[in-house]
Image (cartoon, rainbow, N blue to C red):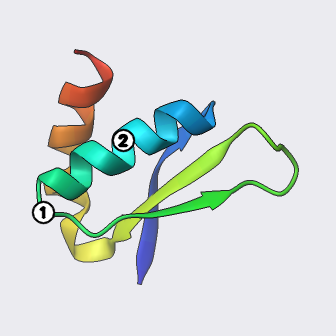
Amino acid sequence: MWTVIYIAPTAKLADKIQTRLTEEGFLIQIRPIHLSKQQFEILVPSGEVEEVQEVLNSILHA
């Protein structure tokens, strides 16, 4: 099962997050939010949420 860990406000940020998390070896899915053409859900497998959250925090606060 996939879990949403973040909602990116732009496609550029969603792509940056996907690239960095993929480089770290995580499986990532990006899904546009249908009500907003600008926002994207970042999803990861449920079992990886805690590890991904740590890396995501470092990406967002860099």
The Cα atoms of the two marked residues, 2 and 1, are separated by 12 Å
Reply above or below: 10 against 17: above
Task: Count every numbered label the image shows and give the total.
Answer: 2
Q: Nearer the viewer, residue 9 or 54?
A: 9
Which residue lies at the image location 49% right of the left edge and 32% below the top edge? 13
Reply above or below: 60 against 33: above
Which residue lies at the image location 69% right of the left edge and 40% below the top edge? 39
Residue 44 locus on image (x, y percent): 35, 66
* Quarter of the figure with the N terminus: bottom left
The amino acid type, in three-letter code, at marker 1 is: Gly
Q: Which residue is mark 2?
A: 17
Which residue lies at the image location 49% right of the left edge and 41% below the top edge? 14
Q: Quadrant of residue 59?
A: top left
49 relative position to 4: left or right = left
Q: Which residue is mark 1?
A: 25
Reply above or below: 24 against 8: below
Q: Tell me the element at label 1.
A: loop
Q: Quadrant of residue 37?
A: top right
